Image (cartoon, rainbow, N blue to C red):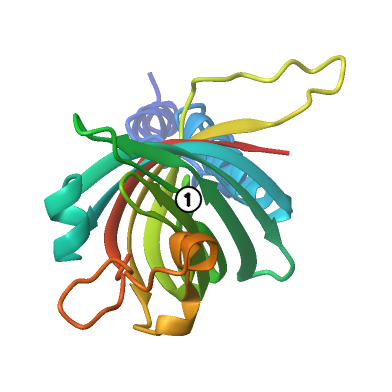
Amino acid sequence: MSLTTAFALLGLSSAFAQDPPDDPPDDPSDAAADPQAEPAAEETAKDQEKTRQTDDITLLLGVRGVGEIWQDPALITAHRSSYFAGAGMVSWRFSSWLSADVELSYLRMGTTAGNTHEMSPIAIDICARKIVERMEMFAGLGPALVPFSSFGQEATAGVKLGVDMRAGVRIATNFYNPPKYPKPAFSRMDLELMVGRRQHMRTPDAILNLQQALQQKPEIPENGDGHLDLSAVRVGVGVVIRR
């Protein structure tokens, strides 16, 4: 073997012994196509769509059970200090963060002596609302009217005027899954929790005594100052459907 041939073979062996070239850098598009990242992105998109749909809804209908705790001594002595009754509500959203809520409830209490007391509280509140993911928080203030009547040894009826204050939360549930076709009557059902206060003014002209009008007797129910006070702490739980 000649010296030239030996040097040529030595050069070829050195070329094959070199390290292989480094791998090319990762393509950024590969990371975007990561299959593990797709479910998280889809869930985020779904939550955003549900929030948008909730914000677009303008009408809510609901039923709730409302417990009232009174403070009038005459009412507590003759009947009881608290009562749980049903109520219906309608809420109409007229801006992105304000709604008008109307609530109507009815309760009837009786005693062993035959006395009955009926009330139909009505509240009209302007509520501020805030949507956070699948939850809507609200707080409102507005006028309250309570038509009432009491029948027993004396018959008394009238309307009390006052102010209603409330705050609560509506939480999205899976109680109802609307069909895609035909178009459903409502889109979702929420669980609602509410707490509030109804405060009345002590005004004697808001009381009409039927016995005084019919029999010319001036007695009216008293709680120490001659006024009937229907102020109450109110706690409610119910369901709301969204149109």
Q: Residue 14, relative to residue 205: is it above or below?
A: above
- Outermost residue, right direction? 182
Q: Residue 130 at what x, y percent from top left? A: 50, 65
In the picture, the quarter occupied by the N terminus is: top left
State the image quarter where residue 30 is shown.
top right
- Left or right of 194 in this view: 141: right
Q: Residue 123 at what x, y percent from top left? A: 53, 62
Residue at screen point 21% across, 83% down = 225
Residue at screen point 29% across, 70% down = 229
Q: Nearer the viewer, residue 233 or 186?
A: 233
- Left or right of 97 in this view: 86: left
Number of numbered discs overlaid on the protein picture: 1
Q: 10 Å neighbourhood of mark 1: few (<14), some, or many (≥20)?
A: some
- Left or right of 38 in this view: 195: left
- Left or right of 95 in this view: 88: left
Q: Residue 177 at what x, y percent from top left? A: 61, 19
Residue under numbered circle 1: 133
Residue type for callout 1: Glu
Q: Please say whether residue 81 is visible from this viewpoint.
A: no
Q: Residue 148 at what x, y percent from top left? A: 46, 55
Secondary structure beneath dot 1 equals loop
